[in-house]
Image: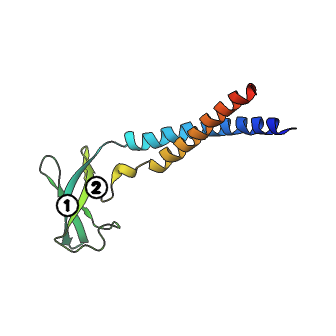
Amino acid sequence: MDLHDIVSMLSEIFTIVGLLVGIPLYIAGLSMRGFGGRWVETDGVIAETQQGPVIRWFDATGEVHEALADSHESVALVPGDDITVWFRSHAPARCRTHSPDHDGKALRLTGLILIGIGAGSTILGIVLLFV
């Protein structure tokens, strides 16, 4: 085996692994963000109840909702402090205090890197056919 054969074989392996693993990872990352529904951003306030500190916020129809303030972002806040919350319009009683922008981002990034490696290896394999 010479260097040409080794590079050609590695190119094929990277093409197969990059595309067969990268494309499903990228699709999974997109689906985590897309199929989960849209989150609505609003302002919430920390309040004290008998169960402990809670976050209260208004939905689009003006109803008040509350959830336990047990997230990482709300632990250090005192009653009366404001906090940004995200809720789903079809289920406004559930909220989150961290941005939904990063949902599936690691899968999308890993998928794009592997797709890039697979596409680059495909091009290298085609070039090696003519060398």
Pick the front one: 129 or 102: 129
Cβ atoms at labels 1 and 2 below 8 Å apart: yes
Mark 1 falls on what kind of element?
A: strand
Image quadrant occupied by the N terminus: top right
User: In this orientation, does residue 65 appear?
Assistant: no
Q: CA distance from mark 1 to mark 2?
A: 10 Å
Q: Does residue 130 sit above or below 71 in this rendering?
A: above
Image quadrant occupied by the C terminus: top right
Pick the front one: 103 or 48: 103
What is the x, y in percent for residue 29?
47, 43
Task: Specify how the rendered protein is coloured.
Answer: rainbow
Q: Which residue shows up at 44% across the image and 40% down it?
A: 30
Q: Which residue shows up at 40% across the image and 49% down it?
A: 103
Q: Which residue is mark 2?
A: 95
Tell me which amino acid carries mark 1.
Gly
Pick the front one: 62 or 21: 21
